[in-house]
C-alpha cells in the first residue's frame, strides 16, 4: 500500500498537526489545571506561526507551497531547539531564565484582594516538569513532535510531495 500526499496536503497536515499540539497544551492547561511556565508559553509561539503559515501554503501555487514547507521545517527545527532547551532546564543541564514563573492572573482591585491573591497564586518554575509520560515532560514531547513535523515538511518540499509505502 502506498500513501501519496501532495505538497498542499502536507502543508495542511502540518497546520493541523500544529493545531492539535497547541490544542493538547491548552487542554492540559484549562481542563487539567497545569499552569504553563514562561518557557512553556514561549514554546507555543512557533506553533502559532506555523498554523496560519501551513494553511496559507496549502492555498498557494506549488512553487510557493514548497517555500512554505521549507519555512515550516525551519520553524519546527527552532521549536525543537526551544523544547530541548526547556527539557535541559528541567533536567538541570542548563540554567533557566531568572524570571521563570507562570502567567499572571487577573489584577487585584485593592491591597486586601492582592494579598489574598498572593496566598492562592502558585508560581510555576521552568525547572520542574509538571507532568511526564514515558520519562518525557511536555517539553520533551514538544521536541519529538517538532522534529516529526519538520521532517514531514522538509521531505515533502524536497520531493514535491510525500510518499509512504513500497
Image (cartoon, rainbow, N blue to C red):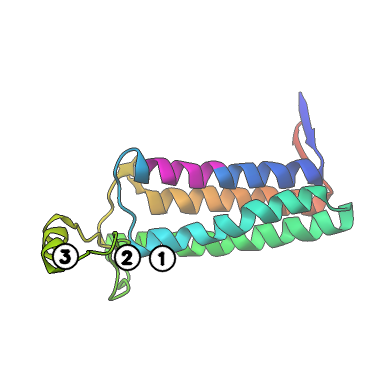
Read off the residue under disc 1.
85
Label 1 near label 2: C-beta < 8 Å?
yes
Gap in angstroms between the C-alphas marked 3 and 2:
31 Å
12 left or right, relative to 93 = right
Q: Alpha-carbon neighbours of circle 2 within 10 Å: few (<14), some, or many (≥20)?
A: many
Count of numbered circles on the image: 3
Q: Quadrant of residue 111?
A: bottom left
Residue 77: numbered disc = none
In the depicted structure, whether residue 10 falls above or below residue 128? above
Percent coordinates x, y for residue 99 in the rendering = 29, 74
150 left or right, relative to 1 = left
- Per the image, label 1 sits on a secondary structure element best described as helix
Q: Nearer the viewer, residue 38 or 105?
A: 105
**Residue for point 63% across, 42% down:** 16
Q: Earlier in the sequence, mark 3 or mark 2?
A: 2
**Residue for point 45% across, 63% down:** 42
Q: Magenta-highlighted stretch: main secondary structure?
A: helix
Q: Which residues are magenta?
A: 20-28
Q: Which residue is outermost to the top?
A: 1
Q: Quadrant of residue 10?
A: top right
Residue 89: numbered disc = 2
- Per the image, label 2 sits on a secondary structure element best described as helix
Gap in angstroms between the C-alphas marked 2 and 1:
6 Å
Q: Where is the N terminus found, in terms of image quarters? A: top right
Percent coordinates x, y for residue 137 in the rendering = 35, 49
64 left or right, relative to 151 = right
Q: Alpha-carbon neighbours of circle 1 within 10 Å: few (<14), some, or many (≥20)?
A: many
- Per the image, label 3 sits on a secondary structure element best described as helix
Numbered disc in front, either 1 or 3: 3
Q: Nearer the viewer, residue 51 or 105?
A: 105
Residue 24 lies within the magenta run: yes
Read off the residue under disc 3.
114
Amino acid at each position: 500500500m502506498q500513501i501519496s500526499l501532495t505538497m498542499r496536503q502536507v502543508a495542511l497536515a502540518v497546520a493541523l498537526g500544529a493545531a492539535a499540539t497547541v490544542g493538547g497544551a491548552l487542554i492540559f492547561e484549562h481542563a487539567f489545571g497545569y499552569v504553563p511556565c514562561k518557557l512553556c508559553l514561549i514554546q507555543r509561539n512557533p506553533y502559532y506561526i506555523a498554523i496560519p503559515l501551513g494553511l496559507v501554503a496549502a492555498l498557494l501555487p506549488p512553487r510557493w507551497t514548497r517555500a512554505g514547507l521549507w519555512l515550516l521545517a525551519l520553524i519546527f527545527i527552532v521549536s525543537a531547539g526551544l523544547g530541548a532547551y526547556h527539557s535541559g532546564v528541567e533536567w538541570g543541564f542548563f540554567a533557566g531564565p531568572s524570571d521563570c514563573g507562570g502567567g499572571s492572573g487577573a489584577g487585584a482591585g485593592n491591597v486586601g484582594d492582592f494579598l489574598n491573591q498572593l496566598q492562592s497564586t502558585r508560581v510555576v518554575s521552568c525547572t520542574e516538569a509538571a507532568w511526564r509520560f514515558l520519562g518525557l515532560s511536555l517539553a520533551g514531547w514538544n521536541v519529538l513532535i517538532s522534529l516529526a513535523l519538520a521532517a514531514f515538511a522538509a521531505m515533502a518540499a524536497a520531493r514535491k510531495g510525500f510518499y509512504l509505502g513500497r
